[in-house]
Amino acid sequence: MKILILGSGGREYSIGRAIKNEQQQHELFFQPGNGATENLGTNINIKDYNDLAAFAKENKIELTIVGPEAPLVDGIVDIFKAEGLTIFGPSKEAAQLEGSKVYMKNFLAKYNIPTAAYIESDSIEELYKFTDTLKTPIVVKADGLCGGKGVIIATSHDEAKKAIGEMLSGKSFGDAGKKVIVEEFLDGFELSMFAICDGDDYILLQAAQDHKRIGDGDTGPNTGGMGAYAPTPLVDEELYQKVRERVIVPTLDGMKAEGAPFEGVLFIGIMVVNGEPITLEFNVRFGDPECEILMPLMTSSVSEMFHKAATNRLKEIKVEFSEQFAVGVVMASANYPYSSSLPAEIVEDTVLHEEIQKYTHISYAGVMKEDGTLYASGGRVLVCVGLGNTIQEARDRAYLRCGQVHFVGKKIRTDIAYQAL
Ligand SMILES: Nc1ncnc2c1ncn2[C@@H]1O[C@H](COP(=O)(O)OP(=O)(O)O)[C@@H](O)[C@H]1O
Ligand SMILES: [Mg+2]
């Protein structure tokens, strides 16, 4: 197949890499891709969605896979489908499950999917009133997309009210904060689950855990994610079953009832409280770096899975997973997540150790290529992925690989997967 992948991160690299490793040969295009996706296919540079659809038609692209949320929320899937193109991702309407937290929370409430008690409003009085009924900490969320920065966990009522005021005034997040959610704080452990959906059916991938904070022991500011591992032993079959019955099935049914069948990746942010999965939020695409560890755990064809999902035929295939564990360690640049860093040349040792050659690889993210040299140019530069028969083994291998990649200022967390060890 000719396949177009949208995005420029490690997530998109890992999808491309998985497809490249399939037995069948495929031709890949990336919009815009990064300095390393060039090695997997062709990077193009067409920002306008209509122009991109025209490119896909002209070049007989048989499948388009959308990595990030922004084009989905903008409605790229609708534009491609109107042109008769096959694209994997939710429609603009269905993408509201991520694009609007108010839409998502009201959807969860309407279909009785367990979620934190909340109020959504644009009235400061209403929000304050509800805030006063809650114990601290109190969770305050902006409605719209904020690049993972729109949630404040306030430790006092005053702090919560200040956050509400700043969101509503547009000061903190512009239009994304025009509506605000205040909700109860849930105390438990967090999971990410991913269901590949075709509107009617779904395939649930292994549960993962990510690491949002920059520092070891979950300290310091939030990042896009500093590492992840899967499958997590914190989930047993009973919990998977609860997520299927209480979250995924009612969501697919509910979205159909809303007239917006959900096709794409349903990313469920879950807080497990006393053994019960409570939905924190939905995203409508893969997490990054979760994608980088889930892709190598799939032993059946990834391109076929996405293609079947995009054509409402998931029922026809059986997806297979490796028995192994995967651990991904993100390597970030010097000033991440505070500010950008100067481009730094990436030097990789030749990997001689057979085991490391066989059971590790790199998914490249914030990298650019100049005169054949690869430079670290973004915040999160790359992900070293290790596979193993235990989490410990996968993790040891990932860290061994980390030791063989160098650039000035490289920054990693040293405790990825600690929750499981
Ligand atoms: N009700 C809640 N109780 C406890 N922690 C929460 C709650 N809601 C969100 N969080 C924490 O804040 C993080 C970000 O919130 P989330 O709803 O996932 O928004 P986003 O990913 O868009 O920033 C979550 O991953 C979780 O750690
Ligand atoms: Mg989240």
Image (spheres, grey):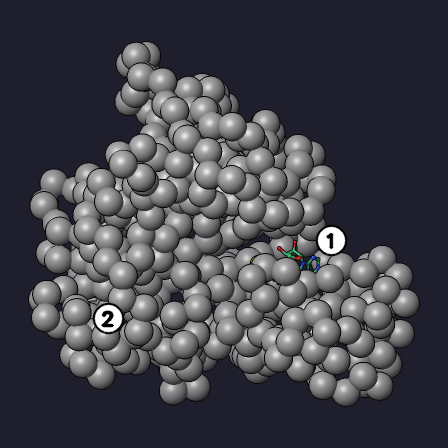
Identify residue for label 1. Answer: 187
Left or right: 227 in relation to 187: left
Identify residue for label 2. Answer: 52
Residue at 44%, 68% in the rendered image: 70
Q: Secondary structure at mark 1?
A: loop
Task: Work out which residue is located at the far front of the displayed protein and give it.
Answer: 371
Residue at 77%, 73% in the rendered image: 166
Residue at 42%, 24% in the rendered image: 405
Residue 105: x %, y % from top left: 60, 75
The reply to whether the residue tagged 2 has its Cβ within 8 angstroms of ligand 1 is: no
The reply to whether the residue tagged 1 has its Cβ within 8 angstroms of ligand 1 is: yes
Q: The residue under label 1 is which amino acid type?
A: Asp
Q: Is residue 61 above or below residue 381?
A: below
Q: The residue under label 2 is which amino acid type?
A: Leu
Residue 41: x %, y % from top left: 19, 48
**Frontmost residue, 103 versus 83:** 83
Left or right: 111 in relation to 353: right
> Which of the 4 quarters of the picture holds residue 10?
top left
Marks 2/1: CA distance? 44 Å
Q: Nearer the viewer, mark 2 or mark 1?
A: 2
**Frontmost residue, 126 versus 43:** 43
